[in-house]
Amino acid sequence: MLNILKIAILLLILLSISACSIKTVKPWERGVLARESMKSDGHPLIKSADDKIYFSKEASSGGQGVGGGGCGCN
Amino acid sequence: MSAATCALLSSGVAPAADEFETEVGASSLLYHEIGRVTVSENSLLLKHEFRDDEFVTAKAVFDVMSGVSPSGAAKIAGDVQTITSPSGHLITIQGDQTPSFSFSDIRSALTLGWLKPLSRTLNLSLDATGSKEEDYSSLGASASLSKELFKKMTTLSFGLGGSLDNVEPRGGIPVGLTSSTSSLSRKEEESKQILDSVVGITQILNRKSLMQLNYSIGYSTGYLTDPYKIISYLDSATDEPRTGDPYYFEQRPSERLRQNIYLKYLHGTRSESIDASYRFFWDDWGVQSHTFDMRYEYDLSKGASLQWHARVYGQSRADFYHYFLYDDPVDGIAARDVTDAPGDLSAASGDYRLGSLNTYTFGAKYSLPSSYGVFSVRSELMVQHDRKQKFEPVFAFITQLVWRLKFF
């Protein structure tokens, strides 16, 4: 557990450091990043359906966001 | 988190000054487990911009669920078992069959949301959700803040959400770890409270890649037990349901602390993209899990696209999960199959979803844009199996039709 947290903190520090050294991407250069499939929270109607399926079939949940409501499925 | 993504990835292509965006969407999903549960879920989504970058959203979901679900009782080779269902009926289970209960239910849910920019680099997202089933209701709300830094190359996000749930099962709330045929008086309903929070950072790495790292922590308290699940109580000498009171209602702890570390990497070109993520989950029930998820999409002709999806999941069992209970420890039997008499237990469950299991999902999604919106169809196969093969693998087919249309 502690090892996972240490790795996560290290990743966070690396991300923060790299953020300072990464070349800025201008708005007109973000065509690829604007692809629907490049959105980090996914397709809303597909993601919410998958979240509910795996919430009801497995003992784990969460990780990406909050909210969404409860159900008696687990 | 969606506010963070939308703001971070704005490509600079904007409508005219007096035009506001509206998005509508609909989805129909069919989830079918062979020989078990079938769920039909239908959703409608509306997102409307009524002021610059300020949106209201509404999402309605309607589920119809039916089929049979494992009761938590153990499968016994050879012998016929007679079990009392949650509704009080006696059910005869043939030898070597998983004791299951039939059920049917309908769930309706409505989510209302509001996305508001507080400044050029600070966005707020609020939403509230209410849902109702025959035996379960939930009322929740959440708030998320996202702050853009370094010319929108970095986004910090924080989200907080909570819900108040009410459990009102058919037949009332059974007393945990008592006989399933017990006539002890039952409360009509119980409640549970859930609180979740998440902090995250999304970082654009270059014109084609970005990463996201999240940490989330959640706390649940109240009635966390499944009122319909039972656990078998076997005679340690015969490995068969013991004479008198062979089935007990399960009991789970009344608190649960859940945590996640989530890492995602996205990389794309003008014609394809790859989305890879990893999640590590752990809680104070003893469950740990690893989830690997990957989606690879590429463009086809006429603006269509095909996306392949693979997901691999593995979890370790909850501390209080047992395939069955014994009167007394028996030499040579693995410790987790053996426990003290229920009087010494504070929690025990035979619900296989709390056990050691793996889930594999594989499928594809085809999308086709048109002047009437984007139509998508996805089809996936999900296979879930117990690592010790104590119950049959679950095979489920997931099929979903989705439509989205944006207009100004």
Image: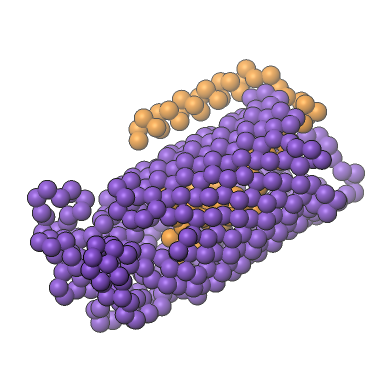
Q: Is residue A70 left or right of residue B328?
A: right
Residue at (49, 26) in percent of width and height? A11
Residue at (31, 75) in percent of width and height? B92
Residue at (31, 50) in percent of width and height? B389
- Looking at this view, name the residue that lies furthest to the front: B78
Instruction: Tell which of B312 and B112 is nearer to you.
Output: B312
**Residue B202 is drawn in which quadrant?**
top right
Q: Quadrant of the N terminus of chain A?
A: top left
- The answer to whether B275 is drawn above or below residue B196 in the figure is above
Residue at (58, 31) in percent of width and height? B265
Which chain can be seen in orange?
A: A
Residue B176, position in %: x, y?
A: 27, 68
- The answer to whether A43 is drawn above or below residue B396 in the figure is above
**Residue B11 is drawn in which quadrant?**
top right
Q: Is residue B388 left or right of residue B381?
A: left
Q: Does residue B207 appear anywhere in the picture? A: yes
Which chain can be seen in purple?
A: B
Residue B59, position in %: x, y?
A: 67, 60
